[in-house]
Structure formats: structure tokens, C-alpha cells
Image: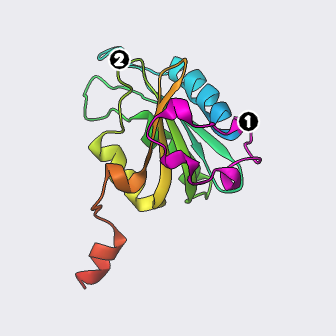
Amino acid sequence: MASAKDGAARVTNEWKVRNIEDMKIPATIRQLHRDATRMRKAAHAPYSKFKVGSALLAPRGRVFGGCNVENASYGGTVCAERVAILKAVSEGVTRFTDIVVVTVAKTPAAPCALCLQTMAEFFDPETRIWLASPTKIVSVHRFVELLPKPFGPKQLAEAE
């Protein structure tokens, strides 16, 4: 996976623009989009035929790719976003600035609830989630917009 050292810090509040066509997408994010598109091609989706690719950016520029891996038991299926997060965590990286998720749905799909819950463990509220097709980035959302009230370590600590 290519390093993306030139970018996370240069992304400004510009990303809050809702019309993605009106914003200048940073080179780092364009590279993440290419990485996620490439990862989508590696997806193992013989049951749903719904291939997903993701590319996750850590603050120091490391990139972790993921693709969905389906299993005949269905419950053993792992989504592309979680594959990327698990790869990063297995290498000691637990903080992230951006993730690009690529699908071929008419409206690119947002992460599922289980992926959002996994993200809650490692993403800051402002972590950006970019939704894309293989040919273009369609939208960007802050993590807190997609999961405004996550369950996490704070709730466990409060229960003690």
C-alpha cells in the first residue's frame, strides 16, 4: 500500500462542504480512493456479489487496505472496513484520520452498523469517511454523523 504522508494535516474544514463536486479533494484522499478501488478487486464475495474495498489512513501516513471476505456461514463474513482496521491494529496502529470505502451501488454504501461499532473503538468523532464508486468520490462524512452515540470504552468505564 502506498504511503500518504503528504496529506491528512492539509485537509481543512473544506470537507464539510456537502456537495463533493464543489470541494477540492486532497491528493492523499485521491490516492486512498485508488487504493480502495484496487482492494475492491480482491474482494471474496461469491454469495452477495457485492464487492467492497477500503483504504484507511493513519496520522503518520500509513495506509491499510481491506476488502470484504464472505463466508458460506454468512456470520463469518468480514467487511472491507473491518479488514483494514484489523490489519492496522495487528500492526500496532490504532488512530486514523480518513477511510475511503468503494462500492458499485448506485448510491455508494455507508459502513454497516457492525463496522461503525468497530470504528467507534478507534476513530475520533471527526475522522472522515469518504464514500465512493470506483470512478469517483461521492460524499464525505464525519464519523460522528454516521454514529452519533457510539457505545465504547467510556460507557464501560462508567458502569464500574
Between residue 27 and residue 153, name the one nearer to us.
27
* Image location of residue 115, percent across then percent down: 36, 45
Quadrant occupied by the C terminus: bottom left
Residue at the image position 70 percent from the left and 52 percent from the top: 10
Q: Based on the picture, tell me whether residue 66 belongs to the magenta stretch.
A: no
Residue 86 in view of the camera: no
Task: Point out the stretch of residues depicted in magenta.
Answer: 1-27
Toward which corner of the image does residue 93 lie, by quadrant?
Answer: bottom right
Residue 98 in view of the camera: yes
- Element type at mark 1: loop
Toward which corner of the image does residue 28 lie, by quadrant?
Answer: top right
Identified by mark 2, the residue type is Lys
Identified by mark 1, the residue type is Ala
Residue at the image position 53 percent from the left and 17 percent from the top: 41
Vertical comparison of 83 with 16: above or below: above
Vertical comparison of 49 with 116: above or below: above
Q: Is residue 150 left or right of residue 45?
A: left
Vertical comparison of 55 with 69: above or below: below
* Image location of residue 84, percent across then percent down: 52, 41
Q: Which mark is residue 19?
A: none
* Image location of residue 31, percent across then percent down: 67, 32
**Which residue position holds label 1?**
2
Q: Is residue 145 left or right of residue 122?
A: left
- Element type at mark 2: loop
Mark 2, Cα crowd under 10 Å, few <14 / some 14-19 / many 20+, is few
Residue at the image position 35 percent from the left and 52 percent from the top: 145
**Which residue position holds label 2?**
106
Which of the two labelled residues, at mark 2 and mark 1, occupies the earlier sequence position?
1
